[in-house]
Image: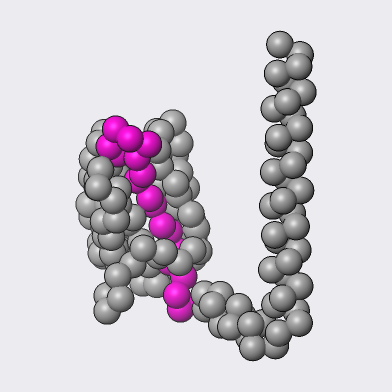
Amino acid sequence: MINGLKWISGICGIASLLLTGACNCCKQSVAENPAASAEATSASPSSSDLYRLVVSFYSIGSGVNREAREKFTAWIGETEKKYGKPLDVEITPWGREGEVDYCIRMSDYAAADQKKIVDSVNELLKSMEYIHVNENAPCLRKRKGR
């Protein structure tokens, strides 16, 4: 058993070194190539590309968490009703098992209301599995032209 653990530890150490070397190699090539550096800078999202909230429902082989998704879609309606204005929600399906991103802008909402809304989403989904909630993030799987 101990020899098996040493073997696994050794493999992990080698993988770590290889990955670190790959990262340093990439960093070095960007630093040496101004065009690559400019390209990397332009690839970072601008503030207009960021959404106040991105909620991703993902799967690990058995579909998304339906209960969580149903609660979340109900929450959207309740929140719009509570504040008397719509949330700007872009729904982007991206997988074969129901994976979907809800990319939400809240530009019509005051900063204090945005915080309350984000806090309520986090509270609603905190014990649910297979969900990522990101703030001020790009809508990664958004289709062009939307």
Q: Residue at x 39, y 52 (%)?
A: 55
Where residue 42 appears, x then y in whole percent?
56, 82
| Magenta stretch in the rendered image | 47-65
Quarter of the rendering containing residue 110? bottom left
Q: Decide which of 61, 142 is in the foreground and name it.
A: 61
In the rendered image, residue 94 lying in the magenta stretch gets the answer no
Where residue 64 appears, x then y in whole percent?
30, 39
Quarter of the rendering containing residue 41? bottom right
Q: Residue at x 35, y 45 (%)?
A: 57
In the image, residue 52 sits, relative to residue 146, either above or below, namely: above
On the question of residue 75 being in view, the answer is: no
Where residue 53 appears, x then y in whole percent?
43, 59
In the rendered image, residue 52 lying in the magenta stretch gets the answer yes
Q: Decide which of 112, 72 is in the foreground and name it.
A: 72
Quarter of the rendering containing residue 63? top left
Dividing the image into 4 quarters, which one contains the N terminus?
A: top right
Seen from this angle, which residue lies furthest bottom?
35
Dividing the image into 4 quarters, which one contains the C terminus?
A: bottom left
On the question of residue 8 being in view, the answer is: yes
Where residue 3 appears, x then y in whole percent?
76, 16
In the image, residue 24 sits, relative to residue 128, either above or below, namely: below
Would residue 112 appear left or right of 102 to someone viewing this image? right
Q: Residue at x 76, y 82 (%)?
A: 32
Q: Decide which of 72, 7 is in the foreground and name it.
A: 7
Would residue 12 appear left or right of 87 to someone viewing this image? right
Would residue 47 appear left or right of 54 to someone viewing this image? right
